Amino acid sequence: MEILRYDILILGSGLAGLRAALQASIVSNGKLRIAVISKVQAMRSHSVAAEGGISGVLYPKEYNDSFSLHAYDTVKGSDFLADQDAVEILARLAPEEIRFFDHLGTPWSRLPDGRIAQRPFGGMSVPRTAYAADKTGFFMMSTLYSNLQRFDNVEIFHEHIATSILLENGVFRGFTVLDLESGEMNLFLGKAGIIATGGGARVYSFTTVSQASTGDGIAIAYRAGIPVKDMEFVQFHPTALIPSGTLITEAARGEGGYLINRLGERFMKRYAPQKMELAPRDIISRAMITEIIEGRGLRDEESGLDYLYLDLRHLGERVFRDKLPMIREITRKLINLDPLSEPIPVLPAAHYTMGGIHVDTYGQVMLDDKTPIPNLWAAGEVAAVSIHGANRLGSNALSECVVWGRITGSLAADYALKAPDTMLNISQIVTNKAREEESRVFDRLIHREVGGENPYLIKRELQRMMDDMVGIFRDGSILGEAWSKLKRLKERMSQARLEYVGKTYNNNLRDILEINNMISVAETIIVGAITRRESRGAHYRLDYPSRDDTNYLKHTIVYYRVGEEPIVTYTPVRITLWKPEERRY
């Protein structure tokens, strides 16, 4: 096992990870050695798939906007589960980040007078979503990646998957990492670490996210004894293309698209008469499923999926050319449909993990409510700051990624600049943990005797179970069945067989590691959903259909226990300005 030593280790190469690397380099003037560890080639990180835009108050006078209004919209959208001090940080720093990316060279869409264009998004009071056509994530990622090339101190390890987090006496020491090209396990030691691996919506089968979004960072943190927070809140995006699940950006509705049922009705008038198609995503997704349940949907015979329509025909060719070019490309390529002349078949799909690793307001990873890990942070979708609470507003995700990428990059750099080089010495405790992990991966997986369970069948059953039992509408008895089934799947996965035992690009081994991570993520989602006996935001219980602020205005915290049931505790929501009120749109 090779040992690699760096001042800062960043796990994940999406917007949050690359922004943290850039900020740490700027703060240290390029003096710190930084390793960015990515399961995929960095520019294939899921952030490139973000389409619609990034929220921020750029022109308060022109749009009658303010930091306070952005924060209020976000808190209300969260169904009042967001930590309001963190939301206020988001609102104040997001505009700075948009302008920072402008200076770096992101090609924002512009108004005729040269200002950065902003479009309406769901749950927002005014247009405050900056965009680069409908390829915003790709352009922001390209900007970051190209600017990082200026720093010789940053080394990116493409196609390296972390298998464990190493802690010693409550201090972060490093990661064990499998080099997918060589098949060798490496030990990365660091003075400071940042986890930025994104979310885990791939635990569902009908999802907008990439195949790589298997919740790895959440899972390895959870198994290392780090608690996770609010994992029951999974966002379903209303408009995923039938039958692939490919994202059809909310920008399509922001530009004036309609949702219609098989009768041609704009049905959102029944559910959110003021906001219509620009209500928050949890409300729209439930409305769509209700329309289907009540018989006003359609059926795709080939896939067996029900669906409704997103109608963009009235927008005209100029809107597609200037603002939604990729949507037209996607529908033409995947289903041979031109949205200029036909409505798009769509269905809500798993999209975003509102919960994540338990962190404080500034992204520092917590072992419990009072005990931080002094040199470990998390940023982006993997972390629960908590900005989004029970429901995220569209375009706040990119804001969170870059704001907390910046914050955690600065804090990690400050720590690493002061930390002694002796932090990179290897102890017997770390050596033993690394050897145990190497043995788990190679001896218990690669060298297992022939036979055992097919991991891909287990994965398919897991995803189907999550779709059917832990979706948009939930029920206590069905969640109980899901929990029992998950335990059986977990046991079967412990006997999963590895067909390919070669070292170079052993995708079979990578898949088994990912499926184990998906099971851990599913465990936290289900146990949180069972114990939260209310309906709030994206978590809707048919047997508890009302929000219960008396008993559940608090964050769910889940701790892992080897071979036993997880421990569930709670921590208060931080309220600064806005008391909970009824959400009306």
Image: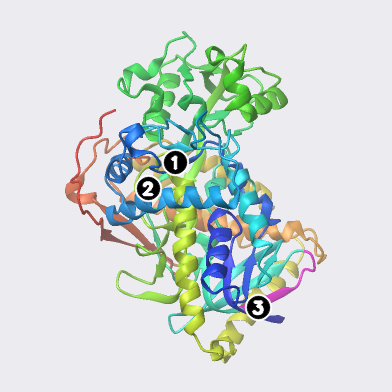
What's the distance in space between the residues labelled 1 and 3, CA to CA? 35 Å
Name the spot of residue 493 as percent of width and height, x first. Answer: 61, 58
Residue 522 visible from this viewpoint = no
N-terminal label among 3 and 2: 3
Q: CA distance from mark 3 to mark 2?
A: 34 Å
Cα distance in 3D space between marks 2 and 1: 10 Å
Residue 204: mark: none
Category of crowding for the residue at label 3, using alpha-carbon neighbours closer than 10 angstroms: few (below 14), some (14–19), many (at least 20): many
Q: Position of residue 240 (x, y in %)?
A: 55, 30
Q: What residue is pinned by disc 3?
A: 187
Observer-nearest of 229 and 568: 229
Quadrant of residue 341 within the rendered picture: top right
Dot 1: few (<14), some (14–19), or many (≥20) neighbours within 10 Å? many
Q: Nearer the viewer, residue 209 or 103?
A: 103
- Please give the name of the residue rendered at 61% of the width and 58% of the height, measured from the top-left corner: 13
Q: Are marks 1 and 3 in contact (CB under 8 Å)?
A: no
Closer to the chain start, of discs 1 and 3, is 3
> 109 left or right of 403?
right
